[in-house]
Image: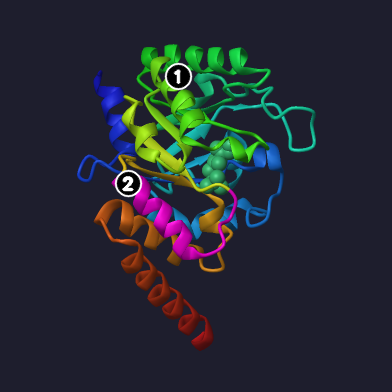
């Protein structure tokens, strides 16, 4: 691996812990102003200090994150579809590599839709991005998207999708947590981070999937809704971070969440 690639990988996966806390704010590229992300700057600013990298589109980056904020960015570079359109899998590349370089990104991210009508197109988009990533020293995050078919998230399907991403040269794979997750990590030679998916019922559910994913070989998270749709997003992120980087168990993370949440409420009450 060349210096530039290694340097950028170290901005995403912390070399001290070998783990990654990525925070996803890219949902608007197909969901529009989704709940919790209506005004991106307001959502992103308080969370940024506790994320190793933020993942978002160039539009939100340029309008809603200050260039001197010190943020490490993984840029979403695929899209072209919307939640009300015919087919979420029909994605293309939305952002040139030149623009990603101008934005000084730590990495670029793209979705693939294995088994969909646009499997070939999305996989070839990923391969093309890896070619460019290797040329310019920029890691590529391959995202095993399922569109509206959330029931696809099982070990058989996710192992297939993750392995294909790794075979095409993806530097990091983002997928979902599932039962028998060790089958997914065990057959994917690239490091894996998990998305959270739609908001889970309880905070403990989030801490449990994060902890189990790490125990079963994931290097971290690239979460969105389960952090910033929570009523105490900073407390939530710091608790998830404690699992990823400090090996906290779900109960320790939950205790931390509760104490940060009550500190926050006290501050608001005394303001
Ligand atoms: C959409 C994405 C999202 O960034 C990803 O799903 C992470 O967010 P969440 O934790 O809300 O699922 O890649 O395709």
Q: Which mark is residue 61?
A: none
Q: Which residue is mark 1?
A: 164
Residue 40 image position (x, y, % from top left): 61, 51
Residue at 31% x, 68% y is: 252
Ligand 1 quadrant in view: top right
- Residue 57 picture quarter: top right
Q: Is residue 11 left or right of residue 222?
A: left
Examine the structure image and report whether residue 57 is included in the region drawn in magenta: no
Q: Main secondary structure of the magenta part?
A: helix
Sooner in the amino-acid sequence: mark 1 or mark 2: 1
Task: Magenta stretch: give its range.
Answer: 198-215
Residue 248 image position (x, y, % from top left): 28, 60
Q: Nearer the viewer, residue 152 or 228?
A: 152
- In the rendered view, tell whether residue 81 sits above or below residue 123: below
| Crowding near the residue tagged with mark 1, few <14, some 14–19, many ≥20 C-alpha atoms within 10 Å | some
Residue 161 image position (x, y, % from top left): 49, 25
Residue 32 image position (x, y, % from top left): 71, 43
Q: Nearer the viewer, residue 85 or 8?
A: 85
């Amino acid at each position: 691996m060349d210096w530039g690639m290694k340097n950028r990988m170290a901005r995403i996966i912390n070399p001290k812990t070998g783990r990654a806390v990525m925070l996803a704010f890219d949902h608007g590229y197909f969901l529009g102003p989704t709940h919790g992300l209506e005004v991106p700057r307001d959502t992103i600013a308080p969370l940024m200090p506790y994320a190793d990298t933020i993942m978002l589109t160039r539009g939100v980056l340029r309008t809603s994150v200050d260039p001197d904020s010190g943020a490490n960015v993984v840029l979403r570079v695929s899209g072209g579809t919307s939640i009300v359109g015919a087919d979420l899998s029909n994605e293309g590349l939305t952002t040139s590599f030149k623009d990603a370089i101008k934005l000084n990104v730590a990495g670029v991210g793209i979705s693939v839709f294995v088994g969909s009508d646009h499997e070939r197109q999305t996989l070839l988009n990923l391969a093309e991005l890896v070619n460019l990533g290797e040329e310019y020293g920029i890691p590529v995050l391959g995202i095993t998207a399922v569109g509206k078919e959330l029931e696809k998230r099982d070990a058989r399907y996710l192992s297939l999708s993750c392995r294909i991403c790794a075979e095409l040269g993806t530097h990091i794979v983002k997928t979902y947590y599932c039962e028998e997750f060790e089958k997914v990590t065990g057959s994917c030679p690239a490091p894996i981070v998990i998305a959270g998916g739609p908001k889970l019922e309880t905070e403990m559910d989030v801490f449990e999937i994060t902890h189990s994913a790490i125990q079963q070989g994931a290097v971290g998270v690239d979460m969105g809704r389960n952090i910033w749709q929570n009523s105490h997003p900073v407390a939530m992120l710091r608790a998830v971070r404690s699992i990823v980087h400090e090996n906290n168990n779900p109960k320790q993370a939950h205790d931390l969440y509760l104490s940060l949440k009550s500190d926050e409420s006290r501050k608001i009450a005394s303001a």
